[in-house]
Image: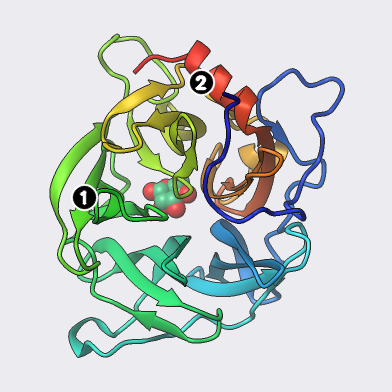
Amino acid sequence: MPIRIVSGENLPNVPWEPRPADCRDVVWRSQRNPVIPRHASPTADSIYNSAVVPFRGGFAGVFRCDDRARNMTLRVGKSQNGFDFQIDDHRLEFECAIPEIAQFLEGYDPRVVPLDGRYYVIWCNNYHGYTIGLGWTEDFERFVQLENVFLPFNRNGVLFPRKVGGEYLMLSRPSDAGHTPFGDIFVSHSPDLVYWGKHRHVMGPKRESGLVNWQMTKVGAGPYPIETSEGWLLFYHGVLTTCNGFTYSMGAALLDLEKPWVVRYRTRPYLLSPDTLYEGVGNTQNVLFPCAALADPATGRIAVYYGAADTSTALAFCQVDELIDYVRANSDV
Ligand code: BMA
């Protein structure tokens, strides 16, 4: 059986560029990068680590926009082709029926997940410390905030796009109050998106070998997992500590379909690491931070949106069969 993407709607207009003739990598960058420049909204300092989903024949998303006070806001953006986005000049406001948590202070690193006819928004929310915020929209105009998912401190919350074993699943990375120098990915279960438990360890940094490597300090889930014939395909970020600070790169793992805390394969080499000027230079140097992926079941094409240097948003492409072959052939679980 060929390797296939098995869920999600066909996306005949998924943003796409063929692999350049001189490129031999399994994941390649858009020639138009950074596709969303830092000043795509005149009130933005930077637009990065953002989430895009198919919406009404085009694309919509929630974007991390640090404004010109360098406050972290979430904003709506829309696009017809997945390359050129109109980003709102004002921040997204949630309706919230729960007064204790309704005061939205700041938010960053959003993910958007289509599930049960809604678009769930997950973000890093400031509630007496950073934790996982959760809300939903149906039209990218009205947004409703639900209960925070966990206690502080936690980041990189990523919801699965369907229930597994009758329950909702959320990936997350427990952390500390600062620029956390550690981090493992866990998955938690919920019957109702309010109460979360049955926490399972998925994967941690690669420390066992004792050798310096790109994912030795911490790891965090990126785009929501893509359901394939071979398991859940999870793009994630891995961090190396250097004498100049953290370097963020992207890898991928294949998780068991029924028990997603079981990692079947995981890339030993990175898939993409800061290499270009827009990834190496910006508000934070050497950051390549994936938060969204569009996957077309009909062609196996995948387009990954990633934040570049905490400044702009870039696109990369791959084919699901080539990528999964690569992950299997270059795996170190
Ligand atoms: C993490 C988050 C990300 C950011 C990264 C690199 O802790 O703040 O938003 O991209 O650091 O600065």
Q: Residue at x 40, y 26 (%)?
A: 215
Q: Please rate how many residues cluster around mark 2, counting C-alpha atoms within 10 Å: few if below 14, some from 14 to 19, many from 20.
A: many
119 over 311 or under it: above or below: below
- Quote the CA–CA distance across marks 1 and 2: 25 Å
Name the foreground residue: 255 vs 251.
255
Tag 2: amino acid = Val
Q: Nearer the viewer, residue 287 or 146?
A: 146
Q: Which residue is mark 2?
A: 327
* Mark 2: secondary structure: helix
Q: Which mark is residue 188?
A: 1
Specify whether 328 is left or right of 332.
right
Residue 175 visible? The answer is no
Looking at the image, which residue is at 49% across and 86% down? 142
- Report whether the residue tagged 1 is closer than 8 Å to ligand 1: no
Please name the residue shown 56% across and 19% down the image. Answer: 325
Give x and y (percent) for residue 326: 57, 18
Q: Quadrant of residue 82?
A: bottom right
Toward which corner of the image does residue 37 lie, by quadrant?
bottom right
> Which of the two residues, 46 or 333, is positioned nearer the viewer here?
333
What is the x, y in percent for residue 72?
Answer: 46, 68
Location of the N terminus (image quadrant): top right
Locate the C terminus and report the quarter of the image it occupies. top left
Which residue in the rendered view is the most extreme toward the left? 198
Q: Secondary structure at mark 1?
A: strand
Is any atom of residue 91 visible in this view?
A: yes
Residue 302 spot, x, y in % from top left? 64, 41
Find residue 49 and name its label.
none
Q: How many marks?
A: 2
